[in-house]
Each structure stands twice: as C-alpha cells, then as structure tokens.
C-alpha cells in the first residue's frame, strides 16, 4: 500500500510540475493571429463603379474605413463624413441645421463632362436655338462617343419611354435637367429622379429609402447617399431582374459549428416535398 | 510555484497517534493486507493534498502584473449596483488592462442612457440582398473573437437566413404529401413559400441576391419583455432605460439559461479565450457594449452602444449597401423608424411569444 | 460527543478489505481524471467540450437533470416509511437520505462543470451576489441546497440518535421529514420548470414536462436504490427487508409504466400534426436533414424501457432477486438515455431560428462525467458504510468495539 501511494505521489508531483509549465504557456496572451493580409487600399461603398474610398489612418490605429478582404467592399466607417460637402437646398429639408446634411459630391468625378459641354454641347457652335436634337429622340452613334457610355444604345431605364435628354441638360452636359429646362447639379440627382419616382423620393427624404450614415437623431449630422451612389441610372433594369440594384459578391458565410463537416444538410429539407 | 507542503520526506513518520495499534487479526482474509488506518490516512492525505495543490497552482495566473488587476476585477459588483465611484474604478481597471493587452490606448465608456431616447430598429426585407456586410461590419466594430483554427472561435452576432421562394408544380399536384406517416389528407403543399424558418445560413453563391431566394438577417431583437432577462439567475443581463438589453460581462456566470430562453437565437457564448488580433481591435469601447469579452461569458448585439449612446448609427446600419437597415429613436415622431411604423407594413418575428421586440421587419 | 461521532464514523469507514480499497481506488483514479479535465475547461474554456452556441447544453446538463431525479427518487423510501409506517422501509429510510445527499452533491458538481465561469458562482449568493426571483435556475439552486440541508439534517440526526442511543425528538424531527418529502417533489418540479418555461424551445414547452420528470425520477431512483440494496445485502451484514425491495419494485413498475405512457402521448401529439415545433422530436426519433446521430440512442432507450417494464410486470421475474437487477439496470439505463441526452440535446436541434447542427460529447465531457459519477459513488460508499455501521450497532458511542470493528 505504501509503495503504491509513494509511486502515486511521485507521479502526482511530477505531473503537477509538468502541468504548471503547460499552464504557464496556456494562460499566456491569447493566440496571436498573423497580421491581417494586405487589404485592398481602395474599397467601394454601395456598388462597384460608384463612390470609392481609399483606406488611410485618421489617427494612429484608427482607419477611415475598413475594407473587406474578400469582396473589396467598405465594411466600417471610421469617419462617416470624409469627403462630403453640404447637400444644398432641398425642398422640405430646410429644418435641418446648416451643415448637417452632407453628400459625397459627384461633380468632382466628372472628368470629361466639362470638356464636353465647353467643347461641343455648349449651345454656341452652329445655331442651336432650339437645339437640333435627333428627330427620333435616340442617341446617334458616333464612334468616338459610343465607347464612353456603353449602356447608351439600349437604355435600360424606363423601358423605351425615356431617353438621354430627359435627364441630361442639352447644352450643359455636366448638369442634369428638370422639366423647366433648368440645370440640376450632379450632386443633387434626387431633384431629378424624384420627378418620376415620387414615393421613393418621399421615403428617401424621410430616411426610409436609401441610406444615411452619421448621427441618427433628427437634425443630427448625416451623410446622405444620393440616388446614383446606389443605382446606375443607365442600367436600372439589369436584364429582367427588376431590382434596381446590381448583384454583387457576398461576404463569407459563418464558421461551421463544432462537429459539422460541412453545411450540405441545409440543402435537404426537413420536411420532404 | 510551491506544489505541496505535506510531509512526504519520511513515510514512516506517524501522523495520528490517537488510535492504538491494531492487533493482528486471526481472520485469514485480512492476513494478506497489513494495512493500517494510519497508512491509509497518510497516503490518502498525500495524494489528495498534492492533487489539490497541483490543481490550485494550475488555475492561478502566471503573470503577477495581471494578478492584482484581475483580483480586483474578479470581486467587483454587479454593474447596476455600483456607485459612480465604483463604476469609475471598474472602467479605469478595464482601460488599463485592455490597453496593456492590445498595445493601444483603449477607452471604456460608461455613458448612461440618454433621457427621451428609446432605440428602435427596422429592416426592409424586400431590400435585403443577403450580402452579409452587416455581419462583418458588426465584427469590425464590436471586438468579437475571430479565430479560424477551431470551431467556436469565430463569433458573429448577426445571422442571415436564406429562404427559397416557393413554387407549386403541376406534376406534384395530387400526389399527397410525401411523409409516410398517416392517412393522406392533402396535396403536396409542402414547397416552402413565404416567411418560414426553414432555410440556409451557410449559403455561398457567386452573386447575391439570387433569383430564387429571399434573405432575412436576424440578431438580437432588444425585446421590451425579454425572456433572457427573466431567466438570468444573477441579473447580469437587463434592459437599459433606452431600451437596449445589455450584459455585464464581468458578472455573467456563463450558465447559458439566457441562450436557451431567447427565441431568436441572438446570444453567443465565448467557448474559449477570445482570439482578437491587436490590429483588428476597436479601441473605442463601452462597458456594456463592445469591450473585449472573456472566456465563458455570453455576448450579443447591443445596437452598438458605444456609438448609439453618442447618437451615431450602429455599424450594421451604416454599412448596408442597399439601405435596408433603419435605426432611430422610437420616441421621436420624425425619426425614420417612427415614420416606418406609421406608414409601412411592419411585423415582428415570433410575435405570438409576446416578447415585444423593438426590431421590426417591414416591406414596401 | 460530536467529535467522537465524526471520528468513530470516519474510522469505521476507512477500514475495509481488498474489494473495498480496490473499489475506492479505481474511483479515485477517475476522480483525478475529473480534476484534470476541470482544469482544462477552466483554462481553455468550453471549447474542449462538444458544446457550441447552437447546442449549448450537453452531457453535463443531461446528467444534472437526471441526477436531480435520482435525488428526488429517494423520497420513495422516506414517504412509505413515515407516512405508511412501512416497517421494512422504515429501517432503511436513512439509506435513502444518504443517496439523496450524494445525488444532490453530484448535481452541484455537474453545475460547476456546466457553467462557463464556475469561479463566479458566488454571484448567485446574496449578500455578495444577487438572487433573482424570476429565474428558474435561481430557484433550482435554492431548492437543491435546501434539499441537501434537509437530508443532511434528517439523515444525520437519525444516525446520531442511533449512535448515542437517545430517542428521536419527534416534535421537530417529524415536521422536518414531512417538509423534506414535499421538498423532494419540488426540486424535480423546479428542474422541469427550468426547461419547460421557455417558449423558445418547443420540444420542451409543454405542461407534461414536470410529470414526465417526476415519473421517470421515481422509476430510475428506486431502480438504483434496489441495486444498491442488493449490493448492501451481499457485501455487508445489513439485511434489507424483502418487503422494502418489493415495495420499491412496485413503485418502479408503475412509474415506469406512466413514463412510457407519457412518452407515447408526446410522440402522438407531436407527430400527428408534424408542425415545425416537432422538429426536435423528429430529430431524436428519425433524424433531421439527414443527420441521425441520436436515432439509435432513442430507440435503444425505448427498447430498454419497455423491456424493463414488461420484465417488471412478470411476477416470477420481479420477485426473483437474482433476475431483478437486470430489469433495474435496463430501466435505469433507458431512463438515463431518454431523459438525459435524449431530452436535452434535441431541444436545441434546430436552433430557434432553424439552424440544424449535431453534438457529440468530447473526451473531456466523458471524463468529467465519469469522474463526477465516480465521486458520487465514492461519497455514497462512505455515507452508506457509516450509516450501515451505525444501524448495525457496530458504531456506538463510547463503545470500544467500534475501534476494532472491521467491515468487509
């Protein structure tokens, strides 16, 4: 009995000594993951081709945006108001304090458009009063222009009932146009889109449609996403999908629970049919 | 580290001398084993002492600097019962600990609920495309464990359910339902259509939204009558005055009753020490919100308290590319959530359970 | 006098033959294993078990629930002993209380194993912690502790009186016994309420749960007690009356029968309409989404329970004390499967929002469970040995024979 006990005691002591060493290792700092792989420095916000953000640090350790390593989409805003300008006057939005309604300007991105309007479509050249527009109200394909906006030929917006000049100003091609022929800034597309899409406009104005980031309180500082940041006006139909928003790549699925090799069982319905 | 202080050097030394020496027994069955009580006590004592000592040694921290802070933290009270001074002490302790662990200046906010604010949430299920960006934005903001090695190390508070659109086929019309039990009473009406909780969570198509699918994200509903709060034995989870159901992570005992009681599967348990790389840690935290948790405690969505108590939208709202998520103050009649409740067709999940969620689903 | 009681008791228990030491030694090895895996669980976390956020109650909770039943089952001895003045039972009532004490201790150990943070369990105890009146788990902890205290008081006071030769002070002893009897029912009812008050878990959310718990408890508990009594008969000089064992057999038979009937009624009700609420039961019986890990367990439990019931009904079988242990073991095993893993795990499949996952216990959980059962049997052996010694008169106050008495 004594022998057994002595052996057991020696075993327990050496075991304890061993365990202590292992414990010291185990209770050390949490497992260090490798540093995040090189993330794309530029990520898109709502859809590819619309607004983009370049990742940089505002403060040490505080980036302006965190991008998804899988899809390149913006996942998190460090500074929601970066690169914004005041929205400008909007009917029924005058109760918002000055500087609290912000948008990301698009007019800065219109590289070629000013050139278009000053060089050719400026209403000055040959007499253009009224402007000589194609009689059939279809865009005339000119080889140098056709490549610029590929969706021109078969405009996927309105099912053949609208054409370019319904939205674009005839002589100031860096502006949009309203029904009175007055120019509308590219930074305020809602004044144009809301002409036909009135209930969406009303919901957008109330914050129900579309997107706003920043402070959620009424009168708080918000960046409003304008129509064209989410919707491509030249291709809203996207074939027959009729969704108004293009398809995009999803983010990765959740981690499988312990004991599950894969998620194939999800494809089998519990109730057969 | 001391392991044992029992007298092990001399096994023949007597420990107890109260009992007289046992006389040799004439019983043949006891002749083989000449054990005495003394021996049993000694050996049993040595064994148990050494194993207890070993176990105790193993369970204490090996880092002394940590030990003092952890000791005070271990004995702190339930957050709601703390005085302001104690809350401040708790906050500073945590800031010190997190800053040390993550190598950057971490702030732990203790901002209380603002008066006149009752937070509410609305999600437009017609718009959701199932892109899961809300899931990952939440993770980017809220310091969840995100290890990839073992199952259970990656925690996400939002789950997006993919449901197929139902359809009815002429061929199956009069076949009766396929289950073999019982007398056939109907047709094949089993193709799921509409809002059923039979679907996929691990979908991974090339592009979303798919033609034949609907998507519905689910996270904590922040109920007005939360079943999780009712079953918590230590009152660590409770509803704050601005409507958010929060957890005091330092008080949670990890009994997981709340996880059983939640009808929306909103709560997650940290099955291990959280894996959170320093670069990915969000240093702006709230005590009841996104501060890093520890092994064995339950966590869940709290509508980004560290943001919403300072009037900012939660991370999921800000990132949704289609603007399906809406958040605001239910007591403010002009907030988008109030207007949605006034104008849109709004419903709650599992409304028959009378949990009165403040997370509404709507469609337009 | 108290110190001599304790020291006489301990000294009597420590003496034993080879078989005794071998038994206790092997239990001690399992207990050491339990301590090791408890350390693992408290440093690495519950990730070493098979539990996940989806299925977050597993083997520990299953055993916990089952053992509360066994603890409550001890009332099947105490009640006839005192309410019906059943002579045979009266002699062994204290042994039932010893089993109850052991079972409650095991339940508490399983609670420690189950918690995410057992180092914080003091949070439940006022004044340092908070007691929540709305929480069923809070009530469960309170009634379990109360039951433990009641049984310790009743059992050890009885043994004390036998030890000193003093008569029992029935003026306060009998009311405490009555309270303990009613309390026994309450511990298991509260445990049933723990899971049956959650509408999020449709498999458990029905009013049948408490009565199922009580009947299965009163079938499994006495089955175990019969086995223990037969072992006591064989290995000690203490003779348990035939009448006691026969009464327990009757209780097991009827309660097992009702339990099977309740299971059958649950199956019919759930599967008749086969709503989504029946998914948990369907997983248990036939598998769900092609996942079928628990299906063989369920059907073997059914076979065991119904087989045991039939065997119990046959007089020649149940009165033959060499064959009776088979039926008791079958009933015990069947109920353990069906009420333990077969009740707890399917409650989480699918999750309330429809995700289906599977669970199997890891090595850590199995080791911990074996260790806690070993610890329970360890304590039970000690308590029973001492109690039997006192009942036999081997341990008497001031008796020099106590010192020399050796139990086999």
Image (cartoon, rainbow, N blue to C red):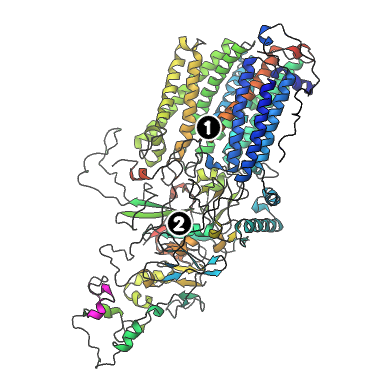
Give the percent coordinates (x, y) of residue C184.
60, 28
Q: Main secondary structure of the magenta part?
A: loop
Question: Where does label 1 land, which residue?
Answer: C366
Residue B135: assigned label: 2
Q: Quadrant of residue C9?
A: top right
Q: Is residue C405 left or right of residue A93?
A: right
Give the percent coordinates (x, y) of residue C353.
43, 47
Q: Residues within 10 Å of mark 2 (few under 14, many from 20)?
A: many
Q: Is residue C353 left or right of residue B77?
A: left
Q: Which residues are magenta?
A: A142-162
Chain holding disc 2: B
Q: Secondary structure at mark 2?
A: helix
Q: Secondary structure at mark 1?
A: helix
Q: Can you say which quadrant of the picture contains the C terminus of chain A?
A: top left
Q: Is residue A215 left or right of residue C126?
A: left
Give the percent coordinates (x, y) of residue C351.
44, 44
Give the percent coordinates (x, y) of residue B337.
46, 63
* Rendered position, C316 above or below C82: above
Question: Do dots 1 and 2 share one subunit?
Answer: no
Residue nearest the viewer, comparing C406 with C181:
C406
């Amino acid at each position: 009995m004594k022998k057994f006990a002595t052996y057991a005691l020696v075993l327990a002591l050496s075991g304890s000594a061993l365990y202590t060493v292992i414990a010291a290792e185990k209770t050390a700092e949490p497992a260090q993951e490798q540093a995040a792989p090189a993330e794309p420095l530029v990520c898109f916000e709502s859809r590819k081709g619309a607004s983009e953000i370049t990742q940089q640090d505002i403060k040490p350790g505080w980036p302006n945006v965190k991008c998804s390593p899988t899809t390149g989409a913006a996942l998190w805003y460090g500074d929601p108001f970066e690169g914004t300008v005041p929205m400008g006057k909007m009917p029924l939005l005058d109760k918002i304090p000055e500087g609290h309604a912000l948008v990301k300007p698009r007019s800065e991105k219109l590289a070629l458009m000013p050139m278009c309007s000053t060089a050719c479509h400026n209403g000055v050249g040959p007499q253009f009063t009224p402007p000589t527009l194609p009689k059939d109200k279809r865009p005339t394909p000119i080889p140098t222009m056709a490549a610029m906006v590929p969706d021109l030929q078969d405009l996927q917006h309105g099912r053949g009932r609208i054409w370019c000049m319904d939205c674009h100003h005839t002589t100031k091609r860096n502006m949009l146009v309203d029904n009175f022929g007055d120019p509308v800034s590219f930074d305020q597309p809602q004044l144009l889109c809301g002409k036909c899409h009135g209930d969406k406009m009303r919901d957008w104005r109330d914050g129900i449609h579309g997107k706003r980031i920043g402070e959620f309180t009424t009168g708080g500082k918000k960046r409003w996403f304008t129509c064209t940041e989410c919707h491509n006006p030249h291709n809203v139909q996207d074939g027959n999908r009729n969704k108004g928003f293009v398809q995009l790549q999803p983010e990765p699925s959740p981690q499988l629970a312990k004991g599950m090799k894969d998620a194939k069982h999800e494809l089998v319905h519990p109730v057969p049919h | 580290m001391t392991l044992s202080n029992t007298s092990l050097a001399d096994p023949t030394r007597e420990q107890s001398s109260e009992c007289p020496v046992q006389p040799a027994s004439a019983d043949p069955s006891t002749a083989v084993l000449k054990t005495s009580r003394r021996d049993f006590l000694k050996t049993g004592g040595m064994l148990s002492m050494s194993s207890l000592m070993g176990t105790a040694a193993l369970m204490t921290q090996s880092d002394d600097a940590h030990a003092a802070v952890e000791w005070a933290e271990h004995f702190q009270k339930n957050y709601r019962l703390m005085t302001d001074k104690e809350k401040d002490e708790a906050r500073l302790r945590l800031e010190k600990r997190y800053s040390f662990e993550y190598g950057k200046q971490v702030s732990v906010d203790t901002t209380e609920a603002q008066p006149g604010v009752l937070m509410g949430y609305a999600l437009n299920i017609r718009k959701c495309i199932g892109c899961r960006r809300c899931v990952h934005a939440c993770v980017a903001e809220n310091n969840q464990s995100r290890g990839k090695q073992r199952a259970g190390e990656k925690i996400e508070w939002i789950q997006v359910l993919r449901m197929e659109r139902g359809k009815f086929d002429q061929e199956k019309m009069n076949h009766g339902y396929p289950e073999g039990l019982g007398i056939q009473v109907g047709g094949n009406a089993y193709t799921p259509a509409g809002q059923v909780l039979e679907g996929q969570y691990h979908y991974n198509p090339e592009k979303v939204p798919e033609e034949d699918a609907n998507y519905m994200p689910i996270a904590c509903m922040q109920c007005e009558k939360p079943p999780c709060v009712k079953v918590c034995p230590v009152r660590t989870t409770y509803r704050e005055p601005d409507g958010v159901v929060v957890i005091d992570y330092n008080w949670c005992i990890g009994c997981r009753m709340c996880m059983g009681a939640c009808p929306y599967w909103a709560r997650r348990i940290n099955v291990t020490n959280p894996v959170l790389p320093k670069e990915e840690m969000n240093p702006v935290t709230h005590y009841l919100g996104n501060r890093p948790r520890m092994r064995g405690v339950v966590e869940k969505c709290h509508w980004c308290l560290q943001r919403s108590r300072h009037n900012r939208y939660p991370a999921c709202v800000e990132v949704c590319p289609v603007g399906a998520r809406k958040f605001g103050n239910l007591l403010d009649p002009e907030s988008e959530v109030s207007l949605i409740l006034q104008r849109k067709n709004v419903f709650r999940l599992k409304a028959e359970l009378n949990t009165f969620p403040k997370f509404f689903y709507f469609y337009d | 006098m108290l110190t001599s009681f304790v020291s006489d008791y301990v000294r009597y228990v420590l003496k034993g033959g080879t078989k005794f030491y071998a038994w206790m030694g092997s239990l001690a090895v399992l207990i050491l294993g339990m301590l090791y895996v408890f350390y693992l669980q408290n440093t690495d976390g519950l990730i070493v078990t098979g539990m996940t956020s989806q299925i977050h109650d597993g083997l520990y909770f299953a055993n916990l629930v089952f053992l509360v039943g066994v603890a409550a089952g001890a009332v099947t001895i105490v009640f006839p002993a005192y309410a019906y003045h059943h002579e045979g039972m009266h002699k062994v009532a204290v042994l039932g209380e010893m089993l109850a004490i052991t079972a409650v201790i095991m339940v508490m150990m399983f609670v420690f194993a189950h918690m995410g943070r057992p180092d914080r369990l003091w949070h439940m105890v006022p004044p340092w912690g908070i007691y929540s009146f709305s929480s069923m788990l809070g009530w469960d902890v309170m009634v379990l502790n109360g039951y433990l205290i009641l049984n310790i008081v009743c059992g050890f006071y009885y043994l004390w009186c036998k030890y000193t030769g003093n008569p029992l002070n029935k003026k306060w002893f009998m009311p405490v016994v009555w309270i303990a009897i009613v309390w026994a029912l309450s511990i298991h009812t509260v445990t049933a309420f723990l899971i049956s008050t959650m509408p999020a878990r449709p498999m458990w959310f029905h009013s049948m749960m408490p009565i199922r718990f009580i009947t299965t408890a009163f079938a499994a508990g006495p089955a175990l007690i019969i086995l223990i009594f037969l072992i006591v008969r064989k290995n000690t000089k203490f003779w348990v009356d035939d009448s006691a064992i026969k009464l327990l057999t009757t209780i097991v038979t009827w309660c097992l029968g009702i339990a099977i009937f309740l299971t059958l009624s649950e199956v019919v009700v759930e599967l008749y309409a086969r709503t989504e609420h029946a998914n948990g039961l369907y997983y248990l019986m036939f598998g769900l989404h092609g996942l079928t890990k628990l299906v063989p367990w369920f059907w073997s439990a059914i076979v065991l329970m119904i087989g045991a019931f039939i065997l119990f009904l046959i007089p020649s079988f149940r009165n033959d004390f060499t064959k009776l242990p088979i039926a008791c073991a079958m009933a015990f095993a069947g109920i353990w499967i069906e009420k333990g893993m077969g009740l707890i795990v399917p409650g989480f499949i699918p999750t309330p929002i429809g995700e289906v996952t599977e669970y199997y216990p890891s090595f850590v959980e199995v080791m911990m469970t074996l260790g806690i059962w070993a610890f329970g049997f360890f304590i039970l052996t000690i308590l029973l040995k001492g109690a039997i010694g006192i009942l036999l008169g081997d341990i008497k106050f001031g008796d020099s024979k106590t010192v020399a008495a050796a139990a086999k």
